[in-house]
Image (cartoon, rainbow, N blue to C red):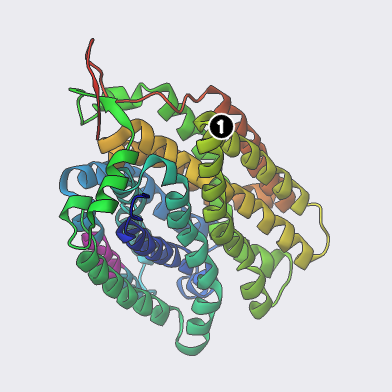
Amino acid sequence: MTNPAPGRTRWVLIAWLFVLSALGYLNRVNISVSGEYISQEFHLSQIQLGWVFSIFTLGYALFQAPTGRLADRFGPRRILTLATVWWAVILGLTALAPSGIAASLLVLLALRFALGMGIASIYPSSNRMVASWIPSAERGLASGWIFAGVGAGAAVAPPFITYLLLHGGWRWSFWVCAAIGLVVGLVWYLVARDRPEQHPWMTPQEAEHIRSGLPLHPAGASMIVPWKTILGSKEVLVISLSYFAFSYAANIFFTWFFPYLKTVRHLDLKSSAFFGMLPFVAMAICSPLGGWISDILTRRYGKRTGRCGIAMAFMGMSSLFIALGTLVADARLASIVLAAGAGALYFCQSCFWSVIADIAGPSAGTVSGVMNMLGQFGGVVAPSLTPLLAAHFGWPAAFLVAAGLGVMGSLVWLAVDPERTLLRQPVVAPVERI
């Protein structure tokens, strides 16, 4: 006789994490689309607008580890619910920001930093959910779907925000995003639970499927990984270095790709909105596809091939497409080639988070927060450095810097051991599942 098929409650939660991820990136990218209107009203230069882009990522980066620790301590259900309320408040205050005072730029910078603080909670909290809810062999696909929300939210942003800009102005676009956030947060609180055994929809078959698929850790090992152990781990530091390169390239797409098409490639607003979607559509498609293929290769050949090999190959491929995109004369074809670079980048996104979830176990929120914090400094640098490089050396040079970092980010995966756990092990101990 065959065992009954497990339930699908875990995938319902992953689906709503996809929605939260999409909303976070809609909130993140909306200012890139509306940036021209905001800079005109607030009398900002491109360099100052770059500061507004970068300050968000600074807040986002600095609060990765703290919000990850909060998710480990209080559970991702409550932390993500509180985060959506925070986003709504900050977006509403941004819509009310005055443009005719001397401190207008400082107000914008403070609000964007605060928004970054709130959105920082998404992925450490999501990875904590993955560590508790998803068997190791399914984590590539689960993480892939969560990060598909990045592409989906960013892809929706250009046409959606453009529509709101044309019909109500940039302030109205922030009000709409705030309202959507409150609704999404309420649904999350109603359907989510921190652990499988707490959920009323859980079946015995699914509970056993989850329990039997969780990674094995030493019995008696400390379940809370100390900060010293995290920051001293070769795997965490090397993966974070690669994620720096990943975030640098990704944030060029999130902040400057739409303005690049409009002002450098001279596409009109509607064409920029359409072609500006392409990298994010590629991200949304390639993220779960890459996670699915990573899981297949991991089951067949092990994590060294399925996680590290995929990350190394597709980060290198992304760099190639980004470099080639700068050489294409036709604006529309260049958009497609650069979009392929974004897709290849996100093909390996789940590898970062799956490896961290496996090696960190119940401290996955904290450890993934540290990885994302260190990696996101690439996202802090990119929005401000990109226009500076473009102004002094041209836009091709700005994209080539991202491609060069991607090659470095690809090669460092050779130093990662995906089987090395961070949980402290007694001298002699049996193993148990987390």
Residue 213 falls left or right of residue 424: right
Residue sitting at x 63%, y 43%: 402
Residue 214 visible? The answer is yes
Main SS, magenta region, reads helix
- Find residue 193 and report its image quarter: bottom left
Quarter of the view holding residue 191: bottom left
Q: Secondary structure at mark 1?
A: helix
Q: Is residue 140 above or below residue 242?
A: below
Q: Classify 409 as above or below 417.
A: below
Q: Determine which residue is flagged by label 1.
A: 301
Q: Is residue 45 left or right of residue 206?
A: right
Kind of residue at badge 1:
Tyr
Residue drawn at (78%, 63%) of the image? 333
User: Picture coordinates of residue 2 (x, y %)?
Assistant: 37, 50
Q: Is residue 85 magenta?
A: yes
Q: Is residue 384 visible?
A: no
Report the front residue among 341 and 353: 353
- Give the position of the C terminus as an image quadrant: top left
Q: Which residues are magenta?
A: 81-90
Q: Residues within 10 Å of mark 1 (few under 14, many from 20)?
A: few
Q: Nearer the viewer, residue 393 or 70?
A: 70
* Residue at x-position 63% and y-position 42%: 314
Residue 359 x, y percent position in the rendering: 36, 31
Report whether 181 appears left or right of 46.
left
Which residue extends farthest top?
Answer: 427
Left or right: 164 as drawn, with respect to 388: left
